Image: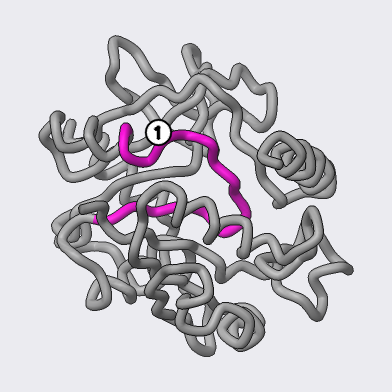
Amino acid sequence: MMPPVVILAGGVAARLRPITQTVPKALLIVAGKPFIAHQLDLLRKNGIKKVVICSGYLSQQIEDFVGDGSQYGLSIAFCVDGEKLLGTGGAVKKALPLLEEQFFVMYGDSYLTVNFQDVYDYFLKNPGIGLMTVLKNQNAWDKSNIVFEGGKITTYDKNNKIKGMDYIDYGLGILRKSAFDVTGFKNIFDLSEIYQYIISKKQMSGYEVTERFYEIGSLSGLAETEKYLLNLRKREK
């Protein structure tokens, strides 16, 4: 059985202002319907049964739209940041009581065409407490931030560029709860800090994806994603 998926949908989407001033990014209309509806349809098609949505900014709007997930053939729970946004890592940490021992993590602005079952099977065959999907990006869609050699992630740094960073975080990860057992992580932190810790302990496997990701985190990304989803709909008819 496939593990649950955590969708990180708590950010304020500052790069998309003013269109996200009163509407959360997850509910932006893309190819005729709120973006999160596309994501949930995608997860169901990949055999996912349970989803936990980590929300924060304008979270009630997302809850009102998604409900319990039954309309998508899913079981959906929410974990809301509260008065302060917890960051992507803090949000996952707060959601741990709602999750199984291992779980997928994906971003609330990403549409990912990779086969989730293939990623999960790879994770099970490679011991460790985490997995990152990586794409040989070479700065094509965003700044490359990963050194990936011989099937191993040796460096992941979103702030400091070093030689050999030809790859980027594709946007789908798998974690075990034990990844959050380490001390030193407060309630507010970025998921990248957990990833960097796991990499430093040589407990992070890397799964290489060869097809690009789509995202709505920027206006250009929003336009490209809409074009892709409209074409996808035509192909599926």
Left or right: residue 136 versus residue 125 is right
Percent x, y for residue 8?
A: 49, 63
Amino acid type, mark 1: Thr
Residue plotted at (66% across, 32% down): 142
The span shown in magenta is 103-118
Whether 168 is among the magenta residues is no
Percent x, y for residue 96?
A: 26, 71
> In terms of image quadrants, where is residue 151?
top left
> In terms of image quadrants, where is residue 39?
bottom right
Task: Inspect this view and state whether residue 59 appears.
Answer: yes
Residue 73 lies, with reference to residue 169, above or below; the image says: below
Q: Furthest residue to the front?
A: 237
Residue occupied by mark 1: 133
Q: Nearer the viewer, residue 128 or 78?
A: 78
Left or right: residue 39 versus residue 2 is right
Residue 157 lies, with reference to residue 90, above or below; the image says: above
